Amino acid sequence: MTPAISDQRSEVMLHIGTTIDSISDDYLKPIETNWQASELLPLTSDTSFISDLKTIQEQAQNLSYDFLAVLVADTITEEALPTYETWLSGIKGVDQYENNGWMKWLRRWTAEENRHGDVLNRYLYLCGRIDMRQFEASTQFLIADGFDNLAATDPYKNFVYTSFQELATNISHRRVASIAKQEGNNMLSKLCGLVAADEARHAKAYKLFVSKIFELDPSEMMIAFETMMKRKILMPSQCLKQLGSELNIFSNFSDAAQRIGVYTAHDYIDIMQSLIDEWKIETMTGFNEEAEKARDYVMALPKRMTKIADRIVVPKTEYKFNWILA
């Protein structure tokens, strides 16, 4: 049974929702001026399509196995967007049956995010190194299996999650863009950089939502922050698997990401610390006794987790994903 959400949380969401339209305009771009996948990759209608395709495939030959594995898994994660919209529309205060401010935000956010899977999927199709059926099957598995971010319908916990997750995806796409550029693949670098920039803007918005909740309901927001840190922020690709096997391959993807420095255990800690700093947890006032204890726990967590992260040994052997052609 889903735990009941307090009336106070509902009132806070309703209050913030009255100003959400102006916030949306600050952190989501107009469709008329936003980039689209068709601008970043060659079109079959272009007279230069064949030569452009040859260039893409030649440049893709320089990409390492681990890099391709991370790129595919990142794309699958972006393609699972229906799952994220479904859970966010179920948050208390985000009423999908009414055209309120929160629902407008969610639809516009989803529309921007939808471009990410489009452009990455299209690159994978063109690059010639990916078994597209295997990739597509993994995407379908991830959507069909669903995902539990351990926040239920609580807006406070969910906005901690989205703040963290958008920062994590920004880091991943930004680092992929950097590696692609080092390999001379400027096209891939550009499109991953644009995706990363979107994620950074979205992270700023979700962090702002949490800041506003802290102003209105500091103790309960602090307790929600502590709860999510205790539960750990699970990645949306936590249930990643491949066609023909029930084996969960998330850890193999995570190992590949750590080997090439795209996203590591230390990045997780850095994001946590950045949220502590962003929300001014150390100096915030107005907490009740339970929230003070929650603050103490969260403030001590980065140092504790760093000791654990320092001991992690990442396997050197590459896992053979069926997404990647020999």
Image: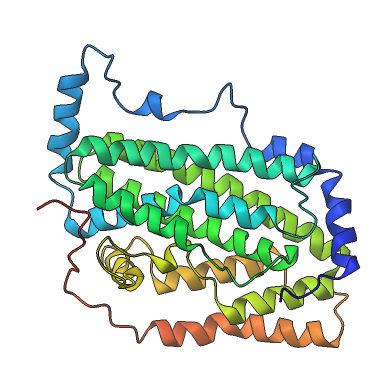
Image side of residue 72 versus residue 230, left or right:
left
To which quarter of the image does residue 183 belong?
Answer: top left
To which quarter of the image does residue 209 belong?
Answer: bottom right
Point out the residue furthest to the top here. Answer: 47
Q: Is residue 284 visible?
A: no
To which quarter of the image does residue 77 belong?
Answer: bottom left
Query: Image quadrant for the N terminus?
Result: bottom right
Q: Nearer the viewer, residue 79 or 211?
A: 79
Where is residue 169 shown, x and y percent of the image? 47, 55
Q: Nearer the viewer, residue 82 or 206?
A: 82
Q: Nearer the viewer, residue 57 or 117?
A: 117
Q: How is the image coloured?
A: rainbow
Where is residue 190 shown, x and y percent of the image? 36, 36
Image side of residue 199 versus residue 239, left or right:
right
The relative height of residue 192 versus residue 264 in the rendered view (above or below) is above
Residue at the image position 84 percent from the left and 51 percent from the top: 16
Residue at the image position 57 percent from the left and 68 percent from the top: 149
Q: Is residue 58 visible?
A: yes
Where is residue 42 shown, x and y percent of the image? 29, 23
Where is residue 79 shown, x and y percent of the image? 43, 48
Residue at the image position 44 percent from the left and 87 percent from the top: 307
Q: How many marks?
A: 0
Image side of residue 178 versus residue 53, left or right:
right
The relative height of residue 252 versus residue 226 in the rendered view (above or below) is above
The relative height of residue 44 versus residue 125 in the rendered view (above or below) is above
Point out the residue furthest to the left here. Answer: 326
